[in-house]
Image: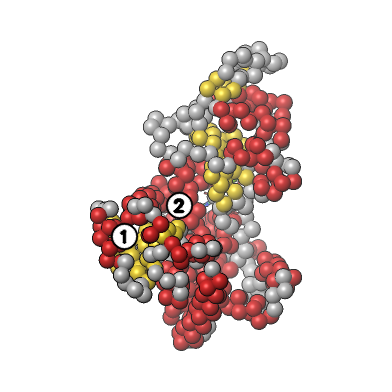
Amino acid sequence: MFEAWIRLVERSGSTFPAMMKALQEAGVKVKPVRREEVSGPGLLVFDEMGPATLEALNELRLCPEARVLGVATSGAMLGNDACWRLLDAGLSDVLAWDRCISPAAEIAARLERWRAVDRLIASPQVQDRLVGRSAAWLGLLRQIIEAAAFTDSSVLLLGESGTGKEEVAHLIHALDPRPDKGELVTLDCTTVVPELSGSEFFGHERGAFTGATTSRDGAFALADGGTLFLDEVGELPPKMQAQLLRVVQEHTYKRVGGNTWQQTRFRLICATNRDLSKEVEQGGFRRDFFHRISSWICHLPPLRERTEDLLPLVHHFLRKMRPGRPPLELEEPVREYLLTRDYPGNVRDLRQLVSRICKSHVGDGPITVGDIPPDERPAGAASARWWQDTSFTQSIRRALRGGVGLKDIGRIASETAIRLALAEEQGNLQRAARRLGVTDRALQLRKAQWGAQAAGVFLEEGQRA
Ligand SMILES: Nc1ncnc2c1ncn2[C@@H]1O[C@H](COP(=O)(O)OP(=O)(O)OP(=O)(O)O)[C@@H](O)[C@H]1O
Ligand SMILES: [Mg+2]
């Protein structure tokens, strides 16, 4: 028996008692909660696709640590694209009570798995290595953990440079539950020269070619029983991709100069910062190879899409860089500077900046603006538009080209600012209002207006469906 939170959006109230009883029998004790108490896996049960459901969804969206299974009392509500709209609104999965053969058992199975995944996320194995609690990062971690701990699939990690792909590859290997598992073997595909690729991948027999004075194991033999990490796989020329088709699919290969087929068992992890789907379309990357390496595809979000994680990352790096010393605080202008700077090299950039700041800091007092290296200081900080960057200008350009008018651009910019301020202040309205330079009341009104507009769209679409 385990406990899970539940939010009920009920109009009729007739199905719920039977549902609660069935869940209890399936081993789930559900507990209605207030918003502040929502955390981990839970249920949103609803019997209408209307404003009350949307309001509950909006509230739950402010709890990134929640993982929500939507349960519609009737499948009739989930017609057309309603399921997709519910996923877009932040649910992790949706099912209809009256369309499942044993709904309570199905719900219990999902909640139990999600609890196991969350427990792993909270473990030191993950927390000491990878920092972040933003919705984007948690969503990614959940996928990674599902793949690592509950499957033996190959995983393709995509993401810009410095987003943590190598770190995630190590995590997948660490969480792999195979008994007596072997090593993680990394092969950097940028360093493989075509003439020696066969030997590098498969090893060679003695005398296989001039200079082969002894036999040697290749990467696939070394990874037997463990994990093979093909880093920068996007740099592998198509000819070398072809060489790997069989071993990736069948797990058999021949050494260079050898005649016998060798067996190897490994989990394959590949990483690249290239857009492989696009390269497949353009013919630069083999489609057959792409399909074999990508049973699971995980996109690592760039740092600009998870700014809530910036400060936790800064504190994590500071702790690591000053082991055994008191944690350093940040003075407000330093905090603001770190939050608003651009990080084209993502977490790696941030780490390097923190390292430079840390080296110039003296004593155990807070970090001050003088600790920021001179070449890093914001140019023209006095100008009112110092925060605009190229991606801001690009977004506006895209909107204009797409026919979006000034009114909508202004509204969306405000909504984005409000959403970010609320997320960074963990939903605290007063603190968010202070950050936004408006009164609590004004922020409340804006939120209500915007909720009403969103409800209009949601309902219109629901009615269309
Ligand atoms: N979530 C995170 N928490 C803590 N450290 C992180 C996190 N993500 C990345 N790092 C750190 O940032 C640095 C860059 O990460 P990593 O080398 O894994 O990036 P990458 O995606 O492989 O980059 P590239 O494409 O350039 O090879 C490393 O020092 C890593 O430890
Ligand atoms: Mg890397």
Q: Nearer the viewer, residue 347 or 117?
A: 117
Looking at the picture, how far across and down is residue 98, in whole percent? Answer: 38, 59
In the rendered image, which residue does mark 1 sit on?
A: 4
Q: Which residue lies at the image location 62% right of the left edge and 63% below the top edge?
A: 342
Q: Can residue 123 be seen from the camera position used here?
A: no
* Outermost residue to the top: 207
Whether tag 1 and tag 2 are in contact, CB under 8 A, the answer is: no
Q: Could you tell me which residue is drawn at 62 percent across and 15 percent down?
A: 258
Other-residue count near label 2 (Cα within 10 Å), few / some / many at <14 / 14–19 / ≥20: some
> At x 54% / y 36%, what residue is drawn?
268
What residue lies at 63% left-to-right and 72% top-to-bottom?
A: 387
Image-quarter location of ligand 2: top right
Residue 465 rendering spot, x and y as whole percentages:
54, 68
Amino acid beneath label 2? Arg
Q: Which is nearer the N-term, disc 1 or disc 2?
A: 1
Q: From what the image shows, is residue 252 above or below residue 373?
A: above
| Image vertical order of residue 264 relative to residue 161, above or below | above
Specify the label residue 394 is tagged with: none
Mark 1 nearby-residue class (10 Å; few <14, some 14–19, many ≥20): many
Q: Position of residue 285 (x, y in %)?
A: 70, 41
Residue type indicated by callout 1: Ala
Q: Element under label 1?
A: strand
Across and down, in percent, residue 303 comes to: 57, 59
Q: How far apart are marks 1 and 2 (CA)?
A: 18 Å
Report the front residue among 364 and 75.
75
Front of the two marks 1 and 2: 1
On the image, numbered disc 2 is attached to which residue? 142
Task: Look at the numbered disc 2 and say if its residue's Cβ is closer than 8 Å to ligand 1.
Answer: no
Q: In terms of depth relative to the viewer, which is nearer, 267 or 362?
A: 267
